[in-house]
Amino acid sequence: MTHPEPRGTIAVPGPAGIDTLDGLREHLQWAVELEHATLPSYLCALYSLRPEDNPEAVEVVGSVFAEEMLHLALAANLLNAVGGRPRLDMPGMLPPYPRRLPHSDLELSLLPFGPEALEMFLRLERPAPPGAPAQGDGYETIGQFYEAIEQGLRRLCERLGEREVFCGDPARQVNGGHFRHTTGRLFAVEDLESALGALKEIVEEGEGSARGEVWDGDQDVFHPDRDEVAHYYRFQELKLGRRYRRGDTPQSGPTGEPISVDPAAVRPMRPNPRLSEHAPGSVVRTAQEEFNRTYCTLLNQLEQAFDGLPKLLGAAVGTMYTLRAQADALLLLPDVDGTTAGPTFEYVPPEARS
């Protein structure tokens, strides 16, 4: 189910940044697309890990994926709050991999867990350097993109007033009662204060509670006695084989207890698989097509949940369990050169979904 763009001319921001409501809505739709774009890459890494043999890596990648889903919901709340309509069920959400992050040069691939996937995730979650400028387009880090949105929000509220900017229907907001899978906070966005809180939640969980900090301000969902490490530093833990502990800094690196990954317990998924690599009717292609239909059903459920039917998030969670089972079956199928098959994340039109 797709929708027309909001009425009004979409403004392409000039040097002054985001300076119209239409420009703000456009950038918040980009934020929805950005947060979704990370999900297939995280899912492939997660699906490739054998949970019984790599529990710590599953814990890290699974927690990041859950928080990216939270960020997607917050981005949708932000867009709804300013009178936009989040769109997810459309072909542009699933371009062929490898692909670029929307409006950025950061590249994403579908890879099994391993050094190459870790380096990709570290590039993706990299904190903005001190003094880095806000970048509404062609951004170098995700934090700089959200900084441009924050500046635009503040500027528009000063010029137009909060009531004019936050003109969306409050009933369209998704709240914590609909989403209980991370220690992150999902809340309604209704004014500048809550909008700034949503942006802070997204950025801090990715790059830390302040530039130069390791922690994201929450407690660890799996270890309530510990502070939670931001996404970038969770991947550093996996890369370096140690956990961060109190007193550690980005400069010191992690000095805590060891964290182990067993490379032999990773399913060797073929990188960036495509439907076209297998004949129609073949076992692998049939399984990939089934996965794609289910994933696009998930996109539709999420779009409807963010477009006025928030209770549909429950159905979306159920669809994610179906996806996991389909992916597990796919990654047991042999492919070429000692690899296994994997999901392709290709778009299926609504009329072709069963």
Image: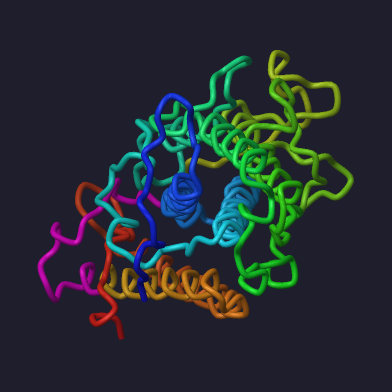
| Left or right: 71 as drawn, with respect to 200 | left
Q: Pick out the residue farthest to the right.
A: 225
In the image, is residue 90 part of the stretch drawn in magenta? no
| Whether residue 131 is situated above or below residue 232 in the rendered picture | above
Q: Quadrant of residue 170?
A: bottom right
For image coordinates 34% across by 43% down, the residue present is 109
| Whether residue 301 is situated above or below residue 102 in the rendered picture | below
For image coordinates 36% across by 38% down, the residue present is 12
For image coordinates 43% across by 49% down, the residue present is 26
| Percent of width and height locating residue 352 | 23, 80
Segment tinted magenta in the rendering = 266-286
Q: Quadrant of residue 333?
A: bottom left
Closer to the camera in the image, 217 or 261: 217
In the image, is residue 275 part of the stretch drawn in magenta? yes
For image coordinates 46% across by 30% down, the residue present is 119
| Percent of width and height locating residue 104 | 38, 34
| Left or right: 179 as drawn, with respect to 334 | right
Closer to the camera in the image, 330 or 191: 191
Q: Pick out the residue farthest to the left.
A: 279
| Percent of width and height locating residue 260 | 63, 38
| Percent of width and height locating residue 206 | 62, 38
Closer to the camera in the image, 228 or 49: 228
